[in-house]
Amino acid sequence: MDVSEIILTTLVSEFSDLTDIEQATRVTLRLLLAALLGGLLGYERETHGKAAGIRTHMLVCTGAALFVLGAELVGAGDDAMSRVVQGIVAGIGFLGVGTIIKGDNMSSVKGLTTAAGVWMTSAVGVSVGLGLEATAVFATLLMLFILNVLPHFFEGADRKRDP
């Protein structure tokens, strides 16, 4: 076997993690769905002028899905999958801290909703990565409701209280 054959064989073996069309379709569907759902959530945040916008949410959601999906593809057991999810939650916590700004007077805090949104977006990604696509879609719709519709209920309540 000459050097070029060894290199070609090595390259083929290194890129052989998607062994059949079913597995390739599953991986593609999950990653694209994670990017789409993350994009929807990020678009909502971006249209409201928030720092963490469409790209951030797409990356968080797709990254979380990929961590879980990668662990699943190598046959990780429940204990290993639990550690992967714990790592995602902890890592996103650090990312969320970066979006929170505390004002000089302790009563002014901004970015909590953005931090919670990034955290929730990672949960959507984990759900997609685990193959819980319907749950992830429902959670995304619920999050969009919370961010877009729910504030209008409170605005109305505030107007009723103001004399």
Image (tube, rainbow, N blue to C red):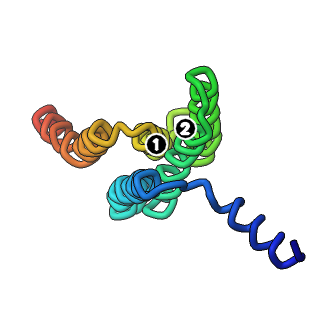
Nearest to the eye among marks 1 and 2: give it: 2
Kindly identify the residue that appears in the image at 10 percent across and 35 percent down: 160
Q: Residue at x 61, y 20 (%)?
A: 79
Q: Judge whether residue 101 can be spotted in this image.
A: no
Q: Is residue 144 above or below residue 44?
A: above
Question: For the image shown, how many numbered marks are present on the structure?
Answer: 2
In the image, taking residue 82 as reference, residue 40 lies left or right, namely left
If the image is split into quadrants, where does the C terminus sit? top left
From the viewer's side, name the closer residue of 13 and 44: 13
Q: Nearer the viewer, residue 163 or 46?
A: 46
Q: Which residue matches tag 2?
A: 72
Q: In this view, does 31 lie to the left or right of 80?
A: left
User: Farthest top residue?
Assistant: 79
Residue 121, given in percent of the width and then of the height, sits at 43, 44
Do callouts 1 and 2 mark residues in contact (Cβ within 8 Å)? yes
In the image, residue 35 above or below residue 138: below
Report the residue marked by disc 1: 129
Q: State the residue in front, 128 or 91.
A: 128
Q: Which residue is drawn at 38% across and 56% down?
A: 29
What residue type is disc 1 on?
Gly
* Camera-side residue of 148 and 17: 17
Percent x, y for residue 15? 65, 62
Quick one: label 2, few (<14), some, or many (20+) residues within 10 Å? some
Q: Which image quadrant is residue 157 in?
A: top left
Q: Judge left or right: residue 135 versus residue 27.
A: left
Q: Locate residue 87, reporting x and y percent.
A: 64, 33
Quadrant in which the N terminus appears: bottom right
Q: Position of residue 111 (x, y in %)?
A: 49, 45
Residue 92, label in figure: none
Amino acid under disc 2: Glu
**Looking at the image, which residue is at 30% across and 38% down?**
139
Residue 8 visible from this viewpoint: yes
